[in-house]
Amino acid sequence: MLSTDQAQSVSARIAQRVKRLPKGQPFSISRFTGFGTKNAVSKAIARLVNRGELERVYRGIYMRPKPGRYVARARPNPWKLISLITKQKRLSLQIHGANAVRRFGLSTQMPLIPIYYTNGASRSVFIGNAEIRLIHAAPMVMQHAGTEMGAAISALFYLGKGGSTPECIAAIKKGLRPEDLVKLLACKLPKWMRTALEAQ
C-alpha cells in the first residue's frame, strides 16, 4: 500500500510527464508502468481525466485534448490509435489494401470507415460514434506488417492477379527502396505475385 506522500509523488510525476506529451497523440497507460503500482497510476490518470488534462479515448488509452479546426476536440489518428489497441492485445496490424493502393498512387478513393488487416479476429472498434474495422487476414498478407513491404503485399493482394497490371507493379516497385524490394521478393508470395514482381 502506498503512503499519501508516495501516491502524491506518483501523481505529480505522471502529471509532469503528461504535460510534455504532444496534444492529440494517443498513448497507452502502460507507458507509466514504472511510475508506481497499477492502482496508483490508474488513480493519477483518472485525476488528470477529471481535471480535463487528459481524455480517455479507449480502454487503457488516453491523449491530451487538442482543439480541432472544425470541432471542439480533434480525434486521434486512426492508425496510431488502432496500433495501440492491437499492441495491447499482442496482435499485428497491417494497412488495408484499399489504403495501400492509394499510398502507391494507384487510387484516390478513401474508404468511409477506416479498415485494417489483423492476425486477430475480425471485429469493429468504436471510438465514440466512430467505427474502425479490423479484418482477419491470412499470414501471407500479414508479412512485414506496418512496413513499406507490408503495404506492397497488401496492395498486390487487394489488386489480385487480374488487377496487378504492369503499370501497377511498376508504381509499387517505384515506391519501394531497392533493399525493400529484395526483402519483398524473399517473402512467401503466391506464384503469380512473384512472377509479376520479377517480370520487370
Image (cartoon, rainbow, N blue to C red):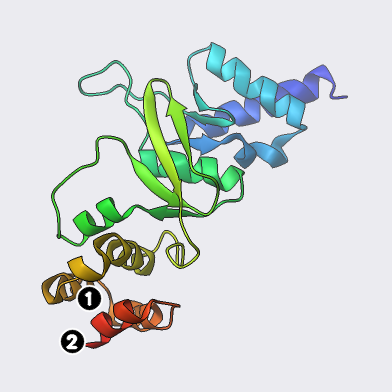
Residue 36, percent from left and from top: 75, 34
Residue 134, percent from left and from top: 44, 43
Q: Is residue 52 above or below residue 106?
A: above
Q: Nearer the viewer, residue 87 or 191?
A: 191
Reading the image, the residue beneath label 1 is 173
Looking at the image, which residue sits at the far right?
1
> Residue drawn 56% across and 19% down?
48
Q: Nearer the viewer, residue 120 or 37?
A: 120
The Cα–Cα distance between marks 1 and 2, rounded to whole angstroms, is 9 Å
User: Is the Cβ of the residue at disc 1 closer than 8 Å to that at disc 2?
Assistant: yes
Mark yes or no: residue 65 visible: yes
Q: Secondary structure at mark 2?
A: loop
Residue 117, percent from left and from top: 42, 51
Identity of the amino acid at label 1? Lys
> Residue drawn 69% across and 20% down?
43
Q: In the rendering, which numbered label is found on residue 74? A: none
Picture quarter with the N terminus: top right
Looking at the image, which residue sits at the far front?
162
Reading the image, the residue beneath label 2 is 200
Q: Nearer the viewer, residue 27 or 107?
A: 107
